[in-house]
Image (cartoon, rainbow, N blue to C red):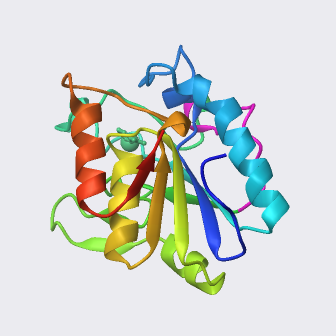
């Protein structure tokens, strides 16, 4: 276990969904399923310490500027109520699930979504849930390290939390070679505690 859990330390499990974490998923993140046992250890540690646990779920409508077919960059993935959008069957779920992207909004952070037309950002309920629980540190795990995990961690810093990302509990898309190293550098520059 990389981090000490406590009642004011939350574990945030990002987008551990079939389309990202299953080898036949439509936006499979290489090695994504290998994070399951690692995340399971984090879940057990969080649970034992009475630390709150939250999950995010990418939850897109069938048409959204997030998808390449509609002007974005991604293959169709995590469409609401489809099997690919389900949390991985082997993931233990012991806390609330925050969905993002539901109304066609874009963006990668678990804390906020962005209107693709106006660019306005709106908060998801994650920040309020963390504050209600009195959280000061957030441990961010899941998929993918260069998108939703990174943006959730960076937003967490902007919102004033201490943030940790244990690298064994994430995997990277690497659209461009080296995106993983660049993401780690960006996280560290923002004051995120990135550990192996
Ligand atoms: C994600 C690409 C597109 C992620 C979501 O969860 O990291 N990546 N949508
Ligand atoms: Zn998405």
The picture quadrant where one finds residue 173 is top left
Residue 61 placement (x, y as % from top left): 42, 46
Residue plotted at (30% across, 53% down) = 187
Q: Nearer the viewer, residue 132 or 178?
A: 178
Residues rendered magenta in the picture: 84-95
Residue 8 placement (x, y as % from top left): 65, 77
Residue plotted at (59% across, 31% down) = 35
The picture quadrant where one finds residue 121 is bottom left
Question: Is 151 drawn above or below residue 22 in the view shown?
Answer: below
Q: Nearer the viewer, residue 46 or 84?
A: 46
Residue 58 placement (x, y as % from top left): 48, 47
Q: Is residue 121 magenta?
A: no
Q: Is residue 88 magenta?
A: yes
Q: Where is ligand 2, by quadrant?
A: top left
Residue plotted at (52% across, 26% down) = 32
* Residue furthest top in the image: 24
Which SS does the magenta portion mostly show?
loop
Question: Is 10 drawn above or below residue 3 in the view shown?
Answer: below
Residue plotted at (43% across, 25% down) = 29
């Amino acid at each position: 276990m990389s981090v000490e859990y406590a009642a004011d330390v939350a574990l945030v499990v990002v987008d551990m969904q079939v389309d990202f974490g299953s080898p036949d998923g439509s936006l499979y993140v290489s090695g994504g399923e290998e994070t399951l046992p690692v995340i399971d250890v984090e879940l057990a540690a969080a649970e034992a310490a009475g630390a709150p646990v939250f999950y995010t779920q990418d939850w897109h409508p069938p048409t959204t500027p997030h998808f390449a077919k509609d002007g974005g960059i991604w293959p169709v993935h995590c469409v609401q109520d489809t099997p690919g959008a389900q949390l991985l069957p082997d993931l233990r779920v012991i806390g609330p699930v925050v969905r993002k992207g539901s109304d066609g909004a874009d963006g990668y952070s678990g804390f906020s979504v962005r209107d693709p037309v106006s660019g306005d950002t709106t908060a998801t309920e994650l920040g309020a849930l963390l504050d209600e629980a009195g959280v000061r540190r957030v441990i961010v795990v899941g998929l993918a390290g260069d998108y939703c995990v990174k943006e959730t961690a960076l937003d967490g810093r902007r919102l004033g939390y201490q943030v940790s990302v244990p690298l064994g509990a994430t995997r990277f898309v690497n659209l461009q070679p080296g995106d993983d190293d660049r993401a780690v550098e960006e996280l560290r520059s923002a004051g995120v505690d990135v550990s192996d």
